[in-house]
Structures are given as C-alpha cells and as structure tokens.
C-alpha cells in the first residue's frame, strides 16, 4: 500500500456534507421555484422603484432595502448551492453546466436590482442623512455607508449593468477555466496518478525522495500547462486594468483595499513591515532549519518537510475534531457549541476526491441557512490547523449572520481574525499539554512555519501580484516573465537558505487567489498580526475578553476595523501595531535557536 493510500486508510471513513438544507437536489422543484420567484420579484421591484429612489422618504427607502435584501438572500442561496455542488465535482460536465446555468440566471436577476445602489449613491449627503433618521433605514446604515464608499468610482447605469452582466462570459468564465484545468491535472508519483491536493500533500512526507519526486512531478505538469495559466493570468489582469482605469483607481491594489474598508496607507504599512522583517523571520528560520536537517541550504521541496525529530504520525479525523473542539471549549464553551454543530449536522466535506476543489474554505451561504466547510484532510498536523482555521471562519459566519445578508459579510482584513485565532487556540492548547521538550520543539517549529506561510509568504504573493499587474499595464507578460517575477519574490522573501530548482518557476500557476480574488492574500498577514496582538491582550487580561471577542464577531461587517479593535486597545492604523504581531514570530524563532 502506498503512503497516500495508507494515510487515507488510517483516517477512516471521512464525512461529506449534506447540502439539503439549501436545496434537495439540482433538479428540485424548490430550486426551480426560487429561480423563478426571485426573477419575478426583482422585475417587480425594478418596475415599482427604478428612477424613484431619491424621492422616497426614509421609511419607504428602508422598506425598499428590506425587500431588496430578501431577494438577494434567495439569489445567494441559489448561487451558494450551485457553487458547493460544483466544488466537489469540477470534472463533471453536467455539474459544471448546472453551476453555469444558475450563475447566468442569477446574474440576469441581479442586474434588475442594480438600480438601488446606483441611485442611492446619487443622493445628496444631507438629504440621505435626513432619510437615515427613519428607523427602517437606520437599520441598514452600515450597509448604506459601505455602498457609498464606492460612490467616487461609480460609472453610468448602463456601463455598470454591462460590466455586471458580462461577468459570466468574462471574468467568471476565466475563473472556471482555471478551476476545471487544475481539477483535471494529474501528477505521476510513485506509480500513482494523483490530483493536485494529493501531490502537494507529499511535500510534507517524511521521506525526502518522495518529496523530491512529488515536487518534480508538480513542476513538470504545471510547466506543461503554463501557457494556459499565463493566458488566464494575463487576461484577468488586463480585465482588471480596464475596469480600474474606467473607475479611476490609482493602483491595482486600491480596489481591493476599498472593498476591505481599509486605507491604502494601512496596507502599505503592513506590507512594508513584513518585507522589512523577512530577514529576521523567514531568512533566519530557514537557515536554522537547514542546519537542523544537516545541510547548508534547503531544496525547495524540503521547505515544509517534517523535522528529523518529528514522528510524522497520521492524525485521524476523530482525534483532529476532538482536539480542535476541546481547544475552542477551553476558551469559550459558547464558541465550541457553535463549532460542534458543523460536525453533528454534516456541514463539512472532508475527504480528498478527484475533481474536488483543492485547498480549503468556509462558505457562509446565507443567514437563513448556515455555512459549509470544505477540506482536503490527509491526517497531517497542518491539516488539524486547517480544520481549526476553517472552523473559526464558520463560527464567525454563524455569529455574523444575525446582521442579515447585507451586513453579515466581514471585510477580508477582519474575516481572517476568527480563523487565525482558532489556530492559535488549538496550537496553544497542544503546546501547553506537551511536556516532552523534543516534541515541544517540533510543535513550535511547525507553528513558526505556519506563521511564515501566513505572513511572509502571503505578502510575497502580494508582491508577485503587484509586479504582474503593474507590468501588465505595458503589455502581456510571457510565461517566462511571470516565472521570473515568481522566483524573484520567493528568493527575496524566503532567503538564501532556500535552493529553487528550475521547475519551481512554475509554482505560481496553482495559487487560486491570484485568479479568484486579486490581492486577497495580504489579508492573511493582516489577520495573523492582528491575532497575535489580540492573543497578547487575552493572555495579559483574560477577564471579559471572551465577551468582547464574541461581540466583535457578531458585528460582521457593520463596524470598521478601528471600531472593532478599540475595545481591546488596539489600532491597526498605527504603524507600530504590526511590530507587535511580527515580534511574536521573532520570539518563537529566538526560542528555537536557543534549543540548538
């Protein structure tokens, strides 16, 4: 039996999710009914109110927004269901067709609803302030505030509608091409034909020859497909450039920052702090790991290798679930109770399967239902941390659901808070329960590597995106040029202790965030540094922290980062704030150095 097969056997039967809380089946009458009803409701709303929004008083406008929210929730339920069905069978033509059909129909319906936000942004500030005195509209004040942040970048109604309707045949279609191409790739390792999730998992294998073979196979297959991935990347970068120029965004990253409700200068300060800290964090740690593994430099396939003292045992799903829930319960029984519902009600899809989306995510669906988690669990210690991470997202989404659909979504910069905090709780619980000094050292090293992946590596991803999007404005980038940028930022961020072989130049092609959400990646670093600071507050003054933390999660997108962090005495706009989080990582590296 191969190691991959043995690991799956050790994990036992892994659960899949039950999507019937959304719809019974793709061809169900309930789904067809909702598609029709939402289209009719949107048409009626458009006929009744389009061109009249500014004339409504506050009470009437509040009623309009409430009806709009109801229709949007139905559409979100439909698209969530179609996407989740698709994510477990991306290589199935009928499933892909179903997903595309739902997306096209919901996009057409959403187009009829655009008038509300467009007309809302044309209302004078003073007139809108008067309308917001009405309780019916005041309920949606945070949503109105966020809609109006895009006011300076809004185009004509016709152009906005065109951009919206063309997504299904433009940006979304290129994303689908990427997803289905990745899902269809096969990597030959050890006589097995593996999907990307299984192949990438072998980079964590105890056997260096297995890691090398997997790494070479991954690089070879990605290289064979690099022209397709380069075409997708160039096309989406050009698409973004065109829209950014029409809207008037100064820099490629500016639209993401606005959507995250965080100022450009705050993000710039974060990125500058992480890049400046890379030598004392990543460069120093990987030099330390190289010595630990008896060499001067690490081949790139050894960057995430288990340390020599690591027993690299397979952690079964039941043990992983119990470990994570116990860590949450030790901090907050209330959060653990919410988390337990994901396991008791089949809200998690766990096993690796051909055609399934690689990686992991938490999908909020709609407040009227509940989130779902997707994992590709293979029994590694890092898989346990991924479970803790995604469960944190799910719990956050449950709590924020009380805000209603329009205000439940948290900006990306804060959306990673609960997930990374969940990882921190799980790690600390495991570390506190371990008395063996060797095992503690291995655990601490694993945590440092996770932090470096979350902070330094994600900011390096952002640097890659900045280079690509800025250069794309002068013309298309060849596959070789894209790969040159990738190798440059990897070398700069990870340091001289890493040796990058030629096939590693193609590893940029499998990162889905570059395709699905340009400049998303810095949110991970934002979240890690923020959580390190939050956790320090918790350790220093635990009394009352749980209540404030839960209230922060309940707020969803109704408050900005300054308002959310103020109760903890933290301010992300202070450049010194980022040093707090980065110093925690540096302290862990100091501790590891002292043990050798």
Image (cartoon, rainbow, N blue to C red):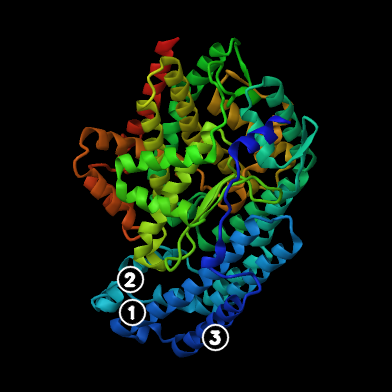
* Front of the two marks 3 and 2: 3
Proximity of marks 1 and 2: CB atoms separated by less than 8 Å? yes
| Residue 190 horizontal side relative to residue 145, left or right | right
Give the mark, 1 or 2, whose residue is nearer the N terminus: 1
Looking at the image, residue 196 lies above or below residue 71: above
Please say whether residue 381 is visible from this viewpoint. Answer: yes
Tell me how far mark 3 sits from mark 2, CA to CA.
Answer: 24 Å
Q: Position of residue 222 (x, y in %)?
A: 74, 39
Q: Nearer the viewer, residue 218 or 422?
A: 422
When asked about the image quadrant of residue 19, the answer is bottom right
Q: Quadrant of residue 406?
A: bottom left
On residue 62, the disc is 1
Provide the residue designation for mark 3.
Answer: 40
Q: Which residue is mark 2?
A: 140
Q: Quadrant of the N terminus?
A: top right
Measured Cα–Cα span from mark 1 to mark 2:
8 Å
Callout 3 secondary element: helix
């Amino acid at each position: 039996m191969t190691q991959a097969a043995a690991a799956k056997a050790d994990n036992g039967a892994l659960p899949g999710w039950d999507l019937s809380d959304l719809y019974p089946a793709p061809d169900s009458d309930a789904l067809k009914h909702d598609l029709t009803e939402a289209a009719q409701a949107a048409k009626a709303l458009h006929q009744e109110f389009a061109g009249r929004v500014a004339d409504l008083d506050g009470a009437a406008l509040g009623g309009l927004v409430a009806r709009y929210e109801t229709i949007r929730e139905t559409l979100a339920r439909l698209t969530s269901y179609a996407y989740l069905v698709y994510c477990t069978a991306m290589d199935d033509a009928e499933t892909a067709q179903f997903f595309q059909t739902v997306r096209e129909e919901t996009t057409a319906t959403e187009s009829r609803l655009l008038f509300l936000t467009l007309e809302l942004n044309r209302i004078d500030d003073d007139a809108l302030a008067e309308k917001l005195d009405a309780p019916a509209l005041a309920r949606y004040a945070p949503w109105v505030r966020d809609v109006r942040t895009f006011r300076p970048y809004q185009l004509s109604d016709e152009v906005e509608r065109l951009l919206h309707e063309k997504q299904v045949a433009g940006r979304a279609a290129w994303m689908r091409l990427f997803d289905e191409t990745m899902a269809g790739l096969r990597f030959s390792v050890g006589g097995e034909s593996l999907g990307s999730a299984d192949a990438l998992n072998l980079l964590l294998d105890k056997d260096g020859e297995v890691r090398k073979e997997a790494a070479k196979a991954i690089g070879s297959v990605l290289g064979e497909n690099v022209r397709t991935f380069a075409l997708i990347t160039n096309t989406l970068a050009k698409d973004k450039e065109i829209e950014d120029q029409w809207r008037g965004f100064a820099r490629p990253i500016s639209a993401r920052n606005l959507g995250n409700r965080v100022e450009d200068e705050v993000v710039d300060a974060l990125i500058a702090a992480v890049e400046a800290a890379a030598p004392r964090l990543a460069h120093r740690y990987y030099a330390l790991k190289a010595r630990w593994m008896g060499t001067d430099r690490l081949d790139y396939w050894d960057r995430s290798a288990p340390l020599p003292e690591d027993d690299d045992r397979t952690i079964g799903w039941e043990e992983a679930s119990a470990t994570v829930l116990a860590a949450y319960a030790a901090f907050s029984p209330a959060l653990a109770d919410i988390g337990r519902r994901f396991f008791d009600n089949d809200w998690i899809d766990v096993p690796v399967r051909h055609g399934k989306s690689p990686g992991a995510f938490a999908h909020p669906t709609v407040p009227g239902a509940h989130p779902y988690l997707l994992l590709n669990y293979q029994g590694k210690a890092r898989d346990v941390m991924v479970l803790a991470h995604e469960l944190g997202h799910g719990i956050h989404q449950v709590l924020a659901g009380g805000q209603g659909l329009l205000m439940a979504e948290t900006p990306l910069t804060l959306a990673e808070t609960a997930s990374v905090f969940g990882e921190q709780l799980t790690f600390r619980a495991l570390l506190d329960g371990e008395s063996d000094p060797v095992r503690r050292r291995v655990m601490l090293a694993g945590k440092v590597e996770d932090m470096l992946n979350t902070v330094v590596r994600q900011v390096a991803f952002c640097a890659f995106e900045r280079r690509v999007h800025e250069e794309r404005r002068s013309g298309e980038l060849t596959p070789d040029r894209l790969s040159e940028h990738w190798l440059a930022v990897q070398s700069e961020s990870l340091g001289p202790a890493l040796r990058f072989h030629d096939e590693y130049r193609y590893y940029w092609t499998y990162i889905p965030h570059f395709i699905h959400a340009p400049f998303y990646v810095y949110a991970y670093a934002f979240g890690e540094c923020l959580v390190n600071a939050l956790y320090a507050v918790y350790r220093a003054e635990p009394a009352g922290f749980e209540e404030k933390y839960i209230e922060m999660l309940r707020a969803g997108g109704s408050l900005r980062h300054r308002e959310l962090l103020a109760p903890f005495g933290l301010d992300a706009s202070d450049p010194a704030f980022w040093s707090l989080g980065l110093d925690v990582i540096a302290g862990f590296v100091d501790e590891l150095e002292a043990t050798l």
